[in-house]
Image (cartoon, helix red, strand yellow):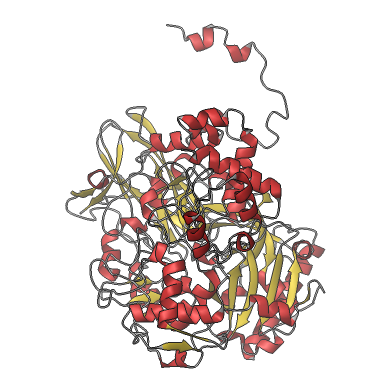
Amino acid sequence: APDPAITELQDWASYLGVGVDETPYGLPIKFETDVVRRNVAWLTASPISSINFTPIHALEGTITPQGCAFERHHSGAIELSKDDYRLMINGLVDRPLVFTYADLERLPRENHVYFCECAANTGMEWAGAQLNGAQFTHGMIHNMEYTGVPLRTLLAEAGLDATGDLADKWVYVEGADASSNGRSIPMEKALDDVLVAFKANGEALRMEHGYPVRLVVPGWEGNMWVKWLRRIEVTDAATESREETSKYTDVHENGVARKWTWVMDAKSVITSPSPQMPITHGPGPLVVSGLAWSGHGKITRVDVSIDGGVTWQTARLGKQGDTKALTRFYLDMDWDGSEMLMQARAMDDTGYVQPTKDQLREMRGENSVYHNNCIQTWFVNEEGVAENVEVS
Amino acid sequence: ARAAEAEIARLAAERDEFQAIAAAGGGLTQPAPVAEAVYGLGREALPEEIAAWDVDVLPDGRGLPVGSGDVWTGEELFVDQCAACHGDFAEGSGNWPVLAGGFGTLADEDPVKTVGSYWPYLSTSWDYINRSMPFGAAGTLSADETYAIVAYILYSNDMVDDDFVLSNETFFEIEMPNADGFVIDDRAETEYSIWRAEPCMTGCKDSVEITMHASVVDVTPEEEGMEEEAMHSEEPAAEDATGDAEVVEASVDPALIDAGKGVFRQCQSCHEVGEGASDRTGPQLNGLLGRTIGSIDGFRYSNSFKDAAEAGETWTTEALEAFLTDPRGAMSGTKMAYRGLSDPADITAVLAYIESIGAE
């Protein structure tokens, strides 16, 4: 029978739509209201010191819109205006300096796309499959184009002659919020690719991402990307703050903890199909879509398995991998309607191959909380419904 | 010094490269010019400014101010300012961190990571408490108070006796039990060397069985419920109230309530209001307007509140305005570590918000 959506005159083809200026800053259309950040209430004591998750299952491409990019606060997101913003550089420098926001805008700036992943992403899965959804298992990540001034430019303004041998020096970076989140970064990284950023995806940072200025530490754990950045101190030792000792250290099976585990290793996940994105169209052409990334560099290859890791085929990259940024991959397949155990396995340009959960457990045990970059398995049944599982 | 020279050479080379690219007329995505050259931006940081912000303390004690505090003073402070989240004996409350005990558990199935069992440096607890605690009133502790609270936490961990006084001198007497419990990231040697290998593509295992289902654990948030919640929060808060409250709110401007919700962010780390609100560092605020001052059972009020309660005084709009304008002036000795709201419009808004969702 003819489709009434075509044969009958529809309201939208007859009546007038809304004019310009209806929403001076737009929001997604009402049909997309389920594409939002979500919280797992039982994880933390209070939403003020907590984390939520990017709806990666519902996004495509690689850029994360700021409005649904995961948030992590230790003492809540603060409203700090550009006028009230100050950035201090002190410690072992020739000239301790204070910059205003306007000063930062006058220094040569760069644009780079980088992923930011919380060290605890996938952390709830160490002891077993727990959360049903790519958003919850892998959503502590976002990927944005940052505009900012290289940290080395600011350090050069303050002068490093007095610092002496740079090889054993650190910068301690600190936020302006009540948690005054602070982390120590070795000088080699500080002079490499760290950015003092004030824009993301072309617009000002959102409050929840550190407006007006945050640190971008490419490839390294999100906790080091200090928001509301207010102070950079050049030191001759790691400060060993709360966030780099009691937290963000990885306890292994023997009770000994790894510290200074800054780099986020290569990782991937199939975002669709996945528990929140079942196959609804039945057998036939199916686009398997996913994300891969590595804190060491570029994603060079992603393999996908639909039989739980017995056989693998190499996926197609959406485009060539960028360094320390999300890479989209696809497997364009013909689904015969039978059950699948879907996995993805990323490789980066250092030759690192994403490990299985068993490999990680064998090495570290189940209590390290952080840095779980294991291969994820989704079970897809004959109806196309997907579930988070573990396999032998 | 060699590293410094190498760095300067690298920066110079990078600048030359940029200039070459710029001369060739291309390369907007290339690195911006960086240099030993100084742009002359920023101003000198004054010693008072550095002193105000550079307060972090290093493991070797650098940054510790002169001062001291004893265990019993620490206990009093702890019970007042920390126990709502961390428990009277630093044993933790709800999902908030446990600060004491847990010795010998790090290799267990569920390690208990406390200041005593896990933290490698004493400086970290002093630094963190001094800068970031109490939650919702960061930066308000004096050096002596911080010494006292840290002394109490050490006592709670059985690491010092009850007559111990922690000071910038006795600081160095404390040995942290797990100081040697850490190794520096060794993934390059232990993991990368093994996992950087050509991966298997076919016949990688004999069989595959599902060994665990997330649905069995059943801890995933329900999306529909969450969406409902999100929808509600976009509506005026008045819609959330029930019963008598609706009558009261009919005449209240939703924009005012919304503004008050924003102001309340400054209060919410210590006070809860609305359905299911309970006491935190501060008492819950349901039915605040018209409530007898200092009347929440079980909450540890300061003396001025106890006196007001005995006199039968109630929270009127005027009394709340006076209190929120100048907490310590209006209620001498209040434990509420909050400087007050200077804009009367903020007070009106926050009271409207509290009334809208916390009316009884």
**Residue drawn 66% across and 55% down?**
B325
**Residue drawn 46% across and 54% down?**
B283
The foreground one among A92 and A330 is: A92
Q: Residue furthest front?
A: B311
Image quadrant where one finds the N terminus of chain A: top left
Place residue B104 in its image quadrant: bottom left
The foreground one among B14 and A361 is: A361
Residue A387 shown left or right of residue B144 in the figure: left
Residue B184 shows in this picture: no
The x and y percentages for residue A302 are 41, 53
The x and y percentages for residue B118 are 35, 77
The x and y percentages for residue A164 are 65, 90
Query: Vertically, is A281 above or below A8?
Result: below
Residue A324 shows in this picture: yes
**Residue drawn 40% across and 79% down?**
B152
The x and y percentages for residue A263 are 47, 68
Image quadrant where one finds the C terminus of chain A: bottom left
Residue A287 shown left or right of residue A22 in the figure: left
